[in-house]
Structure formats: structure tokens, C-alpha cells
Image (cartoon, grey):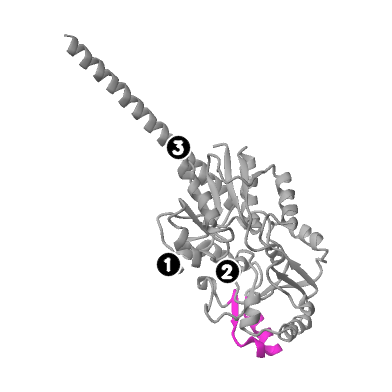
Amino acid sequence: MTNINFLLSSITFLQYYISIVIESNKRNIQSIFYIRKHNKTYADPTTTTNINILNYYIKKYNIQFTTDTKIKDGPIICVDGDIYGPLIKDTESFIMNRKNTNKTNNKIYSLQENLNFIWNYDYYKKKVDYIIFPNESYAQLYNKISDNNIYLGNTKYDYILEKIHIYKKYKLSSKNKYVLVLFPKNKYIINYDITSEHISILYNYLHHMGFTIIVKSRPKDNVYPNCRGDLCVISDIFPNESLELMKISELCILFSSSAIEETIMMEIPTIDLKVDDEISKRLGFLYKEITIQQIINWKNMKYETLIKTIHKLAPKNSIIYKDLKKQYLFEGNISKKIVDFIVENEVKEEDEVKEEDEVKEEDEVKEEDEVKEEDTYNII
């Protein structure tokens, strides 16, 4: 195997791909990015802003790139079957292209972005060869079971800076006590009628406790101008900056977010301010009273209530987080595990093809011998 093909229809996929690229480079396996437009500007890798981001990583990690729809021989890696973002016909041209080749090792390996698989899994599960879940617990909880599933982990945790470098990157003092607030999505701000006043009251409580407030959001969402905290970071690429900021924070506050996984992986106590009426708790198996506390009527929350809730939580890096990771999540370098799996699978495929070719060759020789015998008999 000489290369791995990556379908890149969203700049957000970099946080899953780059660590695999790094691991592939260690084995002299060439990474090729197949780039095309996304129907949402913030994610579109062909915009001027995102092209600049992409070019940095292409040069740094010696990535080949193309806008061609003809995929080279070799494994294909995509995210969630590559079904959202590009036009359906564009997705089909990539996914179905492998059927136009005589090679058998053009397998498709699908990673997952957040919890999007909940709604898109059933559409793409038969169009890819392998679906990589963080853990079997996810598939069981949301009834997404298939023989295509493999349970290896999530690559976005593989390369996180050391604390000293994180403080330097964001120009922060290591002497401060930080709280990370994952700002609510636009849809929750609208549906749950969250005003800047609601957020400001929360910030006042946190400041009174001595916290320095870091606000994290995504390019597709908006943050009230007066609710940007002491530092506001807006990004959704590699490296995953939410993880970096969790690493230096003592507490995380989120709003019905799928980032529950991230908080356990980064071993940080978390408060979930409920704003989603459709889903009570995301990844409910990770909710333990001492790791995540959910507050339902948080708009009317008193200062004393917030303090009592925080005191119920286990301190950062407590053993409970490690136990949850071992039981429900994953450990180790996931990119290495994935590349190991792909290489082993590709070698197996090549061996099977070689064996089939040998059998076919033997059959052809046997058939030729039979023809010769028949010709000799006819002469006699």
C-alpha cells in the first residue's frame, strides 16, 4: 500500500484526518486529499480563508491534493460516508468511483464527526466497507449495529499540546483558574430564548468564584458581543482547540452539547445547562453524578445553586474519568490503531487477490493441458 485517499468536503474534517496523515508519514504512505466545495461557506475548503488553512497543512505534512473525482487505487477515508455538505451527485461520483476499477483494495473507511451518525448512519452504512466508532457503547445506545462497524476510537485526541504550549498559544497565565464555556448553538439560542442577560448572569457568578472565563464557539454560530468572556476562541479545525482549552481549565460548562465525550476524555468536571427538549442527555452512559451535573431550570439559577452543583463534581483528572474512558470510550493513539487496521486489511486483500490469481492461473494451465490431451487423442 503506497497511499491513502481522503475525501475532504469540509475544513472541519482536518481535526480527524491530520493525525492519520502524521501516522501515515511515519510509514512512508502518501496522503492524498480530494477537495471539493461544501454548500456552507464556513465549512467549504475552497474559500479563501479555508484554502489558506489547508495550504499550511498540505505543505507541513507533504499532502498531495486534487479536485479530480477519479480516485487512485488504495483505501479511501471519509467522514460519515461523506454524505453531507457536497451535492448528492458529487458524493455518489466519489463513493461509486471505486466500482469502476478492477482493483479490490479500494475499500472505504468512514470516521464519525460528533454525533452526526445518529441521523445519517442508515443512509451510508451500505455504501462504505467499514464504519469506525469510538466504542461499541455508541452503536448500542443509538441502535446503529452493523457487520461494517469496527470500534477503534476517535483520532482528534491524538495530538494535543502540552499545557505550557497551550498557555503560550493563547497568551494566558498559568496562575489563573479557568472555566471553559462552550457557547450554545444558534438553534438553542433561538428555540430556548437565551438572551445575553442570561449568559451575563452566569458569567458574573463565575467571576465571583474567581474564574477567568474562556468562551469557545464554532464559525457557524454567533456569540453575543457582550458575552465573549475574558477570551473568545472561534474555530473548528485541527488541532481541536476545545480540547486544548479543556486541558488548562478546571471546569467546563456546556449547553446540551455532544462534547460530553470530550469532557470525559479530558477528565474535566462539567455542568450541562439543558436547552434541548428533544434529547434529555447525549451519551447518557457517561453521565455520572460526580462527572457531569445537569441543571434544567438554569435561567433562574441562584449563585448558591451553582456553587453546590460544582462541589458535587469530582476534581479534574480524578480516577472516575479514567474508569469511564476504559469502560465506554477508548485509550491510546487511535490514528496508529486505524492505520494498523487499514494496512493489515489491505495486505489481507492483496494476499486474497494473489491467491485467486494463482488459482486462476492453475486452472488455465490445467485447461490448456486438457486441450492438448484432447488434441493428441483426436490425432490418434
Which residue is labeled 3 in the image? 102
CB within 8 Å, label 2 to label 1: no
Residue 26: x and y in percent read 64, 40
Toward which corner of the image does residue 282 lie, by quadrant?
Answer: bottom right
Asked whether 326 or 257 is in front, the reply is 257
Which residue is labeled 2 in the image? 320
Residue 128 against residue 234 in the figure, above or below: above
Q: Residues within 10 Å of mark 2 (few under 14, many from 20)?
A: some
Which residue is labeled 1 in the image? 143
Residue 76 against residue 231 in the figure, above or below: above
Q: Is residue 53 left or right of residue 375?
A: right
Residue type at mark 2 is Ile
Q: Nearer the viewer, mark 2 or mark 3?
A: 3
Residue type at mark 1 is Asn
Toward which corner of the image does residue 186 lie, by quadrant?
Answer: bottom right
Q: Residue at image x 40%, y 36%?
A: 352
Find the distance from the CA under tag 2 to the CA under tag 3: 51 Å
Mark 2 vs 3, N-terminal side: 3
Residue 105: x and y in percent read 47, 40
Mark 2 lies on a secondary structure that is: helix
Asked whether 269 or 110 is in front, the reply is 110
Q: Nearer the viewer, mark 2 or mark 1?
A: 1
Task: Point out the stretch of residues depicted in magenta.
Answer: 290-313
Mark 1 lies on a secondary structure that is: loop
| Res. 111 visible in picture | no
Q: Is residue 94 left or right of residue 168?
A: left
